[in-house]
Amino acid sequence: MTESQIMRDWYVPVEVLTLRTWLVVAFIVNLLLLTVEVLREDSLSLILGLLICVLFAALRASLPHVHELGKRNISLALSALIIGIGLFRLGSSSLSFFDIWMHAWAIIPSILSLWWLSNRAVTVWTSNKLSTSAIEFGLLRNFETINKHEKISTHLILLHFVLITVIPLLWIIDIAFSPGNALGGEIGDSFSTEHFSKILKGDSFWIWFVNSLIVSIGTSLLGLTIAIPAGYAFSRYKFTGRDVSMFAFLLVQMFPGIIILVPYFLVMKTLGLLNTHLGLILAYCVTALPLCVWMLKGFFDTIPRELEEAATLDGCNQFQVFTKVVLPLSTPAIAVTALFSFLAAWNEFLLALTFNTSNDMYTLPVGLASLISSTGQAWGDFAAASVLVSLPVALLFLFFQKFLIDGLSAGGVKG
Amino acid sequence: MGYLQVESKGDTMVEVNFKNVTKTYEDGFEAVKGLDLDINDGEFLVLLGPSGCGKSTTLRMLAGLEDITDGDVMIDELKVNHLPPGARDLGMVFQSYALYPHMTIRDNLSFGLRMAKGDLKLSKDEIKTRIEEIADVLELSDQLDKKPKEFSGAQRQRVALCIALVRRPKVLLMDEPLSNLDAELRHQMRKEIRRLHDTFGTTTIYVTHDQIEAMTLADRIAILDKGVLQQHCEPLEAYNNPANDFVRSFLCKHIDDLVDTANALFNKPTTNEEE
């Protein structure tokens, strides 16, 4: 009999198990959502929201255990009460996407608890004395379903994180596709491609685009031609000043960009490189190089020396060892480094704003900013241009995804 | 590039001589002290010694991967001290196999041949036949288009051997090639290496710290300790007449202990004369 006693103490239907955690989550979320009500200064909603939180806490406390039919009934009543309040709140709200989502956090958990606590498994468990075979059946059922419940709850939480990251993007895309140059309005309420056609037909976007392309590609090419040999030398050779120069590289990275902005400007002015592509490329290379060199050095360190020694014995000279063995092995790392320096140049704003002051030499970020001037805020054009600027980068990432992951995870793994 | 290739006197006669060779590292550590060693043509010499005794350094000096501080290293009566590694016409098998991961087995095999310069340069057809020949000997013919990572450790080791042999090098160097294999595979590969040596008759220098490997593989062994040559003779000679205390404890005692352990395991009386 002790055996079945143990099973009785240990068997709780999966619904109750799940509710024990989910109700806590629902309580926390509703508590957080109260801040929205505070911001909206709607006192009735705020009181109702508070009430819902309290009721959730009570519901969690009143979840039944074996033979606690009374407690089960209290839980059912509380769930029904929350559903009622939730529906009332929903009815009095403005039925926007956000409101429906917000009120769903009160209604759906309580519907689940009403449904699950009233089903047969829980009813039998709370009212009758369970036979050993019934417990065995119940444990099997738990075993089969509990993973599914956990998976659903994990994905529910992850879905919220996805929404938080995706909604700003959706928003900018929505503004880009809405007529007029105002912010606001619901997502997807109207559709127009006027901003895109205006941006694409205008000359300045294409000028900025070409400028950005030249500067970014120039930066990655020049950066790589310097960083690859430098990284290899730092990785393989011992020479005087090796450690010092490695550290000096990092030291430059530690200053905020704004400190070197003025000296940079004076240097560029003296060299006559203001309003040129070359000036920007040089400046970007200086900032991108330390990262590139360190990344490549780290990768070259993982290539076994024995491979190079074998190549030497096979008759390669130092340069052939490098081109025929080391370079083919480091393509992932080189691709990642190229992509990073490209992106850094593509997105950089401050230096481009300072050096290139004529409209013909603007890069895309500076051009974008010029759309929001003090004379008029063309938010629609700005949004459309932003989408167009992000597209190439997004595509690059899609294509290089495999390389990126290989390149970033290399070094950790031998083989 | 026009490297000066080592001029061979005949097709098969390759002797290697170390004359009073010394290696001192930058930090002052003397890895090899005044080594005199003659390796006959077609001989299988095993360099045996504990870790840090200078055996690998000796091999790497011969290969040209380490500079020689003092003394002469001769291959085929030509002083090779300052000859680039690629011009010495050596094949080397590394402990970690050193297969090029980005090439197929076929490309790995042909890489050395393709990089060859001067007289050693081969036409494409010759390279192809060479590869087929060696793949036949090592039973790799149907796997030539795989990448190294698809192979197990033992297979990679066979490929590494293939690569070293396919160039028909004057001297074959092996740096602890079996250390990464398990006992059973090591036993198999030992037999294989000896078989290949008997087939090709290449002068071979083999570095190991494993006494049993040395005893079973070698024509002659050279025992090193702290950079100094202790004894250089046939394996059984070293076991029967150890030159000094070091050889006695490192070689004889180790083998005796192994025999004793094996005997104790099977409840046989201990004998110190067994091998």
Image (tube, coloured by chain):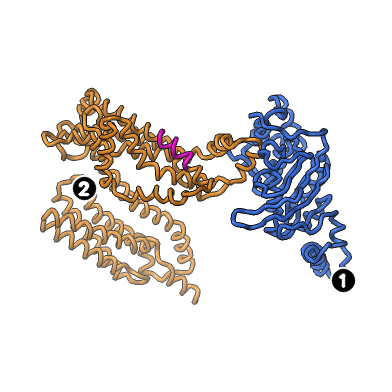
Marker disc for residue B269: 1
Q: Position of residue A10 (x, y in %)?
A: 44, 70
Establish if B101 lies above or below A123. above
Residue at image point 19% right, 53% down: A87
Q: Chain of mark 1?
A: B
The reply to whether residue B236 is visible in this rendering is: yes
Instruction: Tell me the chief SS of the magenta region.
Output: helix
Number of other residues with Cα within 10 Å of mark 1, as a class: few under 14, some 14 to 19, many 20 or more: few
Provide residue B159's location: percent of width, then percent of height.
69, 41
Q: Residue at x 36, y 61 (%)?
A: A18
Residue A98 marker:
2
Which is nearer the eye, B62 or A360? Answer: B62
Q: A267 left or right of A222? A: left
Residue range in magenta is A221-230
Residue B213 within the segment the image draws in magenta: no
Q: Amino acid at mark 2?
A: Phe
Could you tell whether A133 is left or right of A17 in the image? Answer: right
Q: Residue A366 vs residue A323: left or right?
A: left
**Which shade of the palette goes to chain A?**
orange
Q: Is residue A385 above or below residue A39?
A: above
Chain B image colour = blue
Q: Report which quarter residue B163 is drawn in.
A: top right
Residue A46: x percent and y percent? 14, 59
Q: Amino acid at mark 1?
A: Pro
The residue positioned 78% from the left and 34% from the top of the image is: B8
Spatial separation of the CA atoms under disc 1 and disc 2:
88 Å
Q: Provide the secondary structure element on which disc 1 rests.
A: loop
**Dot label at residue A227:** none
Q: Residue furthest right?
A: B273
Q: Quadrant of the N terminus of chain B?
A: top right
Image location (x, y in percent) of residue A200: 25, 25
